[in-house]
Amino acid sequence: MDGMAMAESTSTPPLTSIVEAFEELGKFLQSQQQQQQRLSLDTFCQASSLVSILFSCLGLAFKFAEMEYVSKVDDLVEASKTYDTLDSLIDFDVANDTVKTPGSHSRNLRRVRQGLDLIRALFEQFLSTDDFSLREAASTAYAQVCAPYHSWTIRTAVAAGMYALPSRDQLLVNLEETYQSAEKKMKRYIRASRPVIEYIDKLYLSRSITLDW
């Protein structure tokens, strides 16, 4: 076996890294409720950056989501050089009345949160159906999480792109998983991502910022 083949055979499947990172975030959030600690922006960015590969595994249909997600995570990575926690990042925008301003860190955090939730919803739909095509699962997940906040133009483009989604089997190949291993890891991500998503939502709600944007 040559070096490249060996590296490929021993590489960690992307779902494994993602699940483990979000389970660590979940453990921290459980402990911080008792210790009054705040989630580090840098730690959040490290976990969130791993998720971008899931969008690329969905092919051209989710290219728009991948590009938007990656750009927003990159912005937060840059912001982590200035702000230690998610709280301090949002507080700065609250003080400057720029929370919902396009390009603001708080707005980008909201979009990353939606990206994490979109993957959660997609996994739920994937596990609830045996359809060969991913179109229905992806369309339902998109309608639940992102469509309410997108313009008609974006929604139309997304609907057209759904026809380019890989099959369920091809997605599993892209993820380097069998159905059985993917099922376990998807369920773990669904459980682990929920407290992280809820934590971010509470950061806005506790500052009287609605979530309808």
Image (spheres, grey):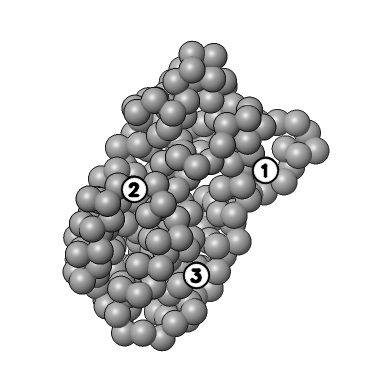
Which residue appears at 63% of the width and 28% of the height? 207
Q: Position of residue 117 (x, y in %)?
A: 48, 54
The CA distance from mark 1 to mark 2 is 30 Å
Tally the numbered discs.
3
| Badge 3 amino acid | Glu
Quarter occupied by residue 32 = top right
Secondary structure beneath dot 3 equals: helix
Sequence-wise, the earlier of marks 2 and 3 is 3
Assess whether mark 2 and mark 1 are in contact (beta carbons under 8 angstroms): no
Which residue appears at 45% of the width and 48% of the height? 114
Which residue appears at 50% of the width and 70% of the height? 124
| Badge 1 amino acid | Leu
| Location of mark 2 (residue) | 150
Residue 83 seen anywhere in this rendered image of the structure = no
Foreground: 139 or 64?
Answer: 139
Foreground: 114 or 77?
Answer: 114
Q: Is residue 123 depicted above or below 49 in this figure?
A: below
| Location of mark 3 (residue) | 124
Sequence-wise, the earlier of marks 1 and 2 is 1
Q: Is residue 49 depicted above or below 57 in this figure?
A: above
The CA distance from mark 3 to mark 1 is 23 Å
Quarter occupied by residue 172 = bottom left
Looking at the image, which residue sits at the far front? 152
Q: Is residue 139 depicted above or below 90 in this figure?
A: below
Which residue appears at 63% of the width and 36% of the height? 205
| Location of mark 1 (residue) | 29
